[in-house]
Amino acid sequence: MNLVRLNPAKARVAMAGLALSMALPAIEGGWAQTASPSLGVQSPAQQPVESQQQIELPPTPVERENPGLINEIGKLFEKSKSALPQLKSPGETFNDLSNLARPSTMVTGRAVCAVAANGAPDCKSGADRLCQSKGFKEGKGIDIDTSEKCSPLVYLPGHKRSPNDCRTENFVTRAVCQ
């Protein structure tokens, strides 16, 4: 048995030729057209029958839901749009702020904040008292001062401090009044 050894370069050329010869019939089938016997524009009656037939396109793929992470995040954003309040335009926001600030005056002073039922300071009442002392109807606190008020016994040497010896007091020191 005789084995023929081919040069590697010749083997590559042979393989490329074989691949090209297999691909050409497929390409030629896709490019098949009827040749026009003359140059120029043809009337619709002279056009070949194949070109007058309607070409049917493959159906468009139906969009299906992608269950991936990005799709789920997109759904979350779509749902959150309905849960959030509508944003006001800059003009509406400016008008609202103007209406709030128009008849307002800032006052300073010192009014104690009452203690609410839950133990937190109620500085709205303190701001109202501060504004009423200056001739206004009501107000909103801007600055609050906090101090600790203790029994004089706390300052005696050797006295052990108990929880009831001192209490925290809050004061409104500046308010916007209307």
Image (spheres, grey):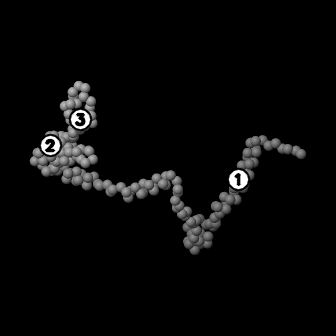
Q: Amino acid at mark 3?
A: Asp
* Residue 155 seen anywhere in this rendered image of the structure: yes
Residue in the image at 82% along x and 42% along y:
5
Reply above or below: 156 against 17.
Answer: above
Residue at 58% in and 65% down: 58
Tag nearer the camera, 2 or 3 = 3
The spot of residue 178 in percent (x, y) is 15, 50
Is residue 174 rendered to the left or right of residue 42? left
Mark 1 = which residue? 20
Judging depth in this view, the residue of 100 and 133 nearest the camera is 133
Give the left or right position of residue 81, taking residue 92 as reference. right
Question: Residue 87 location in percent, x, y?
Answer: 31, 55
Instruction: Name the disc covering residue 62, or none.
Output: none
The quadrant where residue 79 appears:
bottom left
Q: Earlier in the sequence, mark 2 or mark 3?
A: 2
* Amino acid carrying mark 2 in the image: Val
Front residue (pair 167, 53): 167
State the CA–CA distance, disc 2 to disc 1: 93 Å
The image shows residue 136 at horizontal and vertical percentages of 12, 49
* Quadrant of the image containing the N terminus: top right
Circle on res. 107: 2
Q: Which residue is mark 3?
A: 165
Comparing marks 1 and 3, which lies closer to the viewer? 3
Please say if 145 is above or below 33.
above
Q: Residues within 10 Å of mark 3 (few under 14, many from 20)?
A: few
